[in-house]
Amino acid sequence: MKKNIAFIWVMIFSTMILAGCWSKKELNELAIVSALGIDKTEEGYLVSAQIINPSEIAGKSRSGRPETVTFRKSGKTIMDALKKISMDSPRKGYMAHLREVVFGDKMAREGIKDALDILARQPEMRSDFYLTVAKGSTAYDILNVTTALERVPANKLFTTLEQSEKVWAPTKTVTLDELINSAVSKGKEPVLMGVYVYGDPESGSHFTNIQDISPSSGLRIDSIGVFKKDKLLGWLNEDESIGFNYITDNVTSTEETVSCAGGELAISTIRSKTKVHGKIQGGAPRIEIHVHSEGNVGEAACNIDLTKPESIKELEKKYKEEIKKRMEASIKTVQEEYKSDIFGFGDVIHRAEPKAWKRLEHNWDQEFSNLNVTFHVTAKIRRLGSITKSIQAEIGE
Amino acid sequence: MKTRVPKSINQLLKNKESKKLQIQKQSETQQSSQNKDPKDNNLSSDLNKNLDHIKKTLGNSSDIVSREFHAGRNAEIKIGVIYTDGLTDSSSVQEFILETLMVSIRNARLDEDEFHSDSLLEVIKTDSLPVGEIKEISQFQKLLFHLLSGDTILLIDGFHKGFALGFRKWADRGVQEPSSQTVVRGPKDGFTETLRTNTSLLRRKIKDPNLWIETKQIGKKTQTDVSIVYLKGVANDKTVKEVKDRLDCIKIDGILESGYIEELIQDDTYTPFPTVFNTERPDVAAAALLEGRIAILVDGTPFVLIVPALFVHFFQSSEDYYQRADVATLIRALRYFAFFLALITPSAYVAVTTFHQEMLPTGLLISLAAQREGVPFPAIVEAMLMEITFEILREAGVRMPRAVGSAISIVGALVIGQAAVEAGIVSSAMVIVVSITAISSFVAPAFNMAISIRMLRFVFMILAGTFGLFGMIIGLIIMVLHLNSLRSFGIPYLAPFAPFIIQDQKDSIIRLPHWILFSRPRLISQIDMDREDTPPPSPPLGDNKSAGSMFDKLKKSKRVMRD
């Protein structure tokens, strides 16, 4: 008995010692990949990886080297290219802290399904990064620009997208799960945010770019790109993007500008709620969109007396019309130009009328482009801000 | 060949057994030689013979003082006084024995014949010895014990008996503030090395006739007084019996500190967790007695043992009961939190930074990676290095002479803090981790629990270094299983969590107000459960009906809970 216990102890200790930190990864042996850019080439894929140089970001003594390094390799598959990056990088690529995946324009138009597979399959990757499309350029260009303020360009993109979505209606962030779900679903098509390099991409890659007080080149997020399955069809403009986000209930706060007596008035939307109802009427699917939006007066650059209830009523009406106009524009463009159900109306019909959906499913693209959509918008002005009368009205010009 | 090996082993075993037998026989003969001759053990009637025998037995030790003198009307009674210098109050001996005997027997109303009869002893005892503690002795063994305990021995020529007179007095430290378990609010007196002082401190706290103190001598050579103190009728009789039985089992030459007793009576030796509580504070001991626990006082040490000791007891400070309940609860919760911090912070750091980097926020990861840039060791080695350095510093801090204290602290602060980081040997995050661990381990009010955390921390670090979080979780599971298997004098160690006792939660992680602590811990006493019946404080009733109904409700709920 004693012998057995001793034997068990020896076994336990030897497993602990012989395991010898099996599969350990020391922090200073990791190349933390912050962004992946995927482009399509003739032979396969061109993958660029933006790798963080931690000591330049958080270290005590900085040597003046760039905070991130971008390595680029091509391969038959994405995995192939990724592994080849180890020929350039002294450290093992570590994907768990990926912030951003950028698809090249060409790649997005030809289809991103292969990229989605590897992104979803790799267990190392967390699915909390955002996916974007390099509008009109390669993904490599996007990853090759230095950014001011944020030291890591991928982080810049990530945080810009995140906070912009909260305060500016056209922005839409897309994570991997969302993208895959809508690419696979029949009643919903994916969208991705477009990103582009303003200024000269060549000079943007130099360190001197961010030494200017207003950098001549940098990264900027644009409007929403419409996909069909996994292929990019085209882009919405700003108004249409706003309409899209209103319809999909993705507006947290934004600005609406309405005209008023001899000028413009800005209304800050503080909350907005959208409900989409679907039904079958006379054999044809119908969509009803109910939007309830509330806003504050943000800026009154016109001669208006906000103390009067009538002028508020007037404003609310204009506010309502503005939202409605944008949604209509958005739906019109998508229905006529792209014929891709990015709003997820198919899913709404599916939920409301499962039996009818079975019939509509096969020919949904056609049905979608002929879909009858009605809008019911209610809009309220809640607060006027610290002053009531506009300064213009006070001055009396 | 094959057959020879077991043979030789057998032979060895046989030899061993035979040796054992021999030793047994020897000891038996020794014992019998001691007990064989009752004449030898009994006092002789010849005073000189007795004194010679004592001196011979004690090897003419220089601290044994003996004095012979003559008393009686015609100085015909030969009396011998013998005591141990330094343990006896010699001025009292002079005043109350020598003086009184020399004078009073001369004046005693005794007939001539009575001088030689047994009544002389009676007369001396009742008339002539103004001493409180007096014991008759007739055997050498007892005599020597009393002599060496500090009693003064009085022998009279012609009698087979003598007296042991209590004039004990020796250098004493006096009641001082305890150096461990200090409190901000609460009594500042501490136990001392003298058993009598310690029992008096307990008596002063609990003036109940049921506070029973049973004393016995343990240690063949040291003959150390060990007292079992308990509240009769509150303490569980079975536990008291168990304590006595376990103490009776102790066969040892000497008890120098209560730690000897602790190790000899604890339920389980092979555990990092203490199953016997010790304290230097009389108020802690008194509180334990009131809960129905049993205190074991050992002469020669200020540390009093308390059994049964459960896991929760090591997180209770006496101050918890002197502070307001909400403050006490907060601080107690903090202690449990600190316990886990001290236990797993370094291992969690090692596990996360070497195996589970995806668990860190990106910003933190980059910052940690930047710090580890250029550190030559793996995180586990780094952690071990720093922890061991810290343990060495701590041990040095405890044992070093006071005079070099500042030198150690300067070196420690420099080595463990700045220099190691600046030299790039360890990362500054690791220094933070080690510091947090160190500070947290000092939070535990019981020092022996803090030590067990120190030990386990290294085990967890190895587990984290080899298997990451999986290893740590497995380690924690094993630890909890082990804690569940422990018993302290029959009481499950993790009570009142496992087994879960709802009414005892009132004084576990939380400490509810005193008026809710109306019953004793359920598993410990099991006899007298009621502690108090104070109504909860409420605003004066008057015509405020809502207050009155509140009071009734609470009282009712109290009743229900008790039932």
Image (cartoon, rainbow, N blue to C red):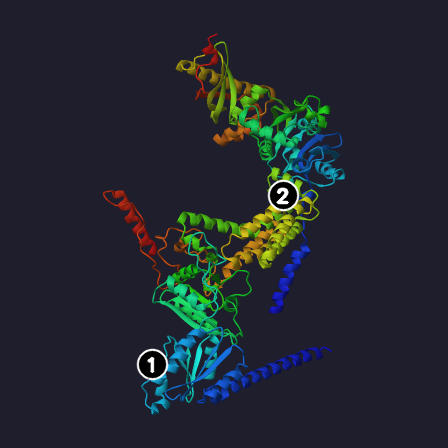
Q: Is residue B523 visible?
A: no
Instruction: Please state which of the two labelled residues, at mark 1 or mark 2, is closer to the viewer.
Output: 1
Disc 2 target residue = B357
Q: Amino acid at mark 2?
A: Gln
At x 67%, y 54%, the residue is A19
Instruction: Examine the rendering and report whether any part of residue A99 can be seen.
Output: yes
Q: Is A117 situated left or right of B501 in this image?
A: right
**B206 or A208: nearer the eye?**
B206
Query: In the image, residue B319 lies at what x, y percent?
Result: 43, 53
In which quadrant is the N terminus of chain A drawn? bottom right
The residue shown at (35%, 60%) is B529
Mark 2 secondary-structure assignment: helix
Nearer to me, B460 or B291: B291
Residue indicated by mark 1: B127
Is disc 1 surrounded by few (<14), some (14 to 19) or many (20+) residues within 10 Å?
Answer: some
The amino acid on which the numbered mark 1 sits, given as a three-letter code, is: Asp
**With B243 as the anchor, is A139 left or right in this view?**
right
Q: Is residue B190 above or below residue B82?
A: above
